[in-house]
Amino acid sequence: MSILQSSFFGKRIKNPVILASGIMGMTKGSLERVCDEGAGAVIAKSLTLEPRKGHAGPNIVEVEGGMLNAMGYPNPGIEEGLKEFGNWNRLDEALIISIVGKSPKEFEQLSQKVEERKKILGASAIEAVISCPHTPGFGTMAGQGTPDSIREITTAIKDNCTLPLIIKLSPSIPGEGKAAKAAEDAGADAVNMGNSLGPGMKIDLNRKVPVLGFGVGGLTGPAVKPIIVRSVFDIYDSVDIPIIATGGISTGEDAIEMMMAGASFVSVGTAAYFRGPPVFGQIANEMKEWMKKNKYSKPGQLTGLAHDEWKKCKSDLV
């Protein structure tokens, strides 16, 4: 048994490294490839009620320390999406279905669709994204990051779907601990701290206009990692449910830092662009080597370690 083996809502997965939604997740085949490359779980491309073309391109541009993206949730809609991702039967890797809506009512309808197909999907959890910073009508642009909105959306989903629920929070809105607590109080089974930060902008000096077709986009990559580490650290003291950390994780040491801050799982996206699809296995192997070197036998031993040490440091200063 690998020292990285983890329990994900009752399913044994080979490691705590997860593919983030929106990266290499448009088809079941691409999700399976990511598993073959080493991921322990995958989050499918976010699905809306109706098909969406997304924002006009260009959709991605490299910037200092990462990239800006403004996809706008291109997807085939919930009906076709669930057909594409159905019949998941991987033994050591979990599938997470991602949904995104403009209102609690839409989240209710989306979760009903997932519940209707739960048996043939084979999914281990459902994730509700309320944190996109660059798509009008969704996420932070729709005011979905407030504790009241989080409670309303979480309740709407939990009342209609029996799969474990992950609420994906934004690092762009202050009060991450209160947001996570609102999700937990409303019945969420885990929170995912991390989406792109922003929005931000890059201007083409020759054309004298923003590079992205939508004008602005969310910042991802190594530049956002310190913000996510701090956000996860704050959330850990606020909730008892598991935390998934998403943002800026490119190496095994990045992943371990997130876990010491309080994460039980880590989600990887932009690193697949910079290091290629094998990054999932590379991160897992780097974690394994670090754990062996430092005499840890399972990932759970790392979760929240920085909190105990930080408390000792502060007590020594008093």
Image: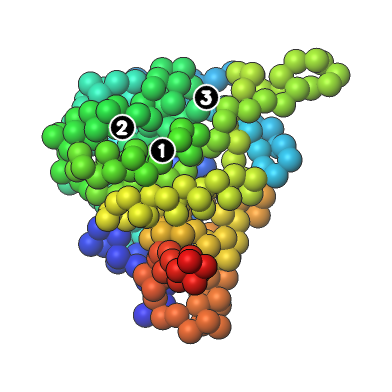
What's the residue at 52%, 24% (across, down)? 134
Say which residue label 2 marks: 147
Q: Is residue 277 above or below residue 53?
A: below
Q: Amino acid at mark 1?
A: Gly
**Helix, strand or loop for disc 2:** helix
**Quarter that holds the N terminus:** bottom left
**Whole-percent x, y for residue 264 in the image:** 38, 60
**Whole-percent x, y for residue 243 in the image:** 37, 53
Q: Amino acid at mark 3?
A: His
State which quadrant residue 85 falls in: top left
Which numbered disc covers residue 134?
Answer: 3
What's the residue at 35%, 29% (across, down)? 146
Camera-side mark, 1 or 3: 1
Q: Earlier in the sequence, mark 2 or mark 1?
A: 2
Camera-side mark, 2 or 3: 2
Viewer-side residue, 112 vs 308:
308
Q: Is there a contact, CB below 8 Å, between mark 1 and mark 3?
A: no
Q: Is there a contact, CB below 8 Å, between mark 2 and mark 1?
A: yes
Which numbered disc covers residue 175?
Answer: 1
**Helix, strand or loop for disc 3:** loop
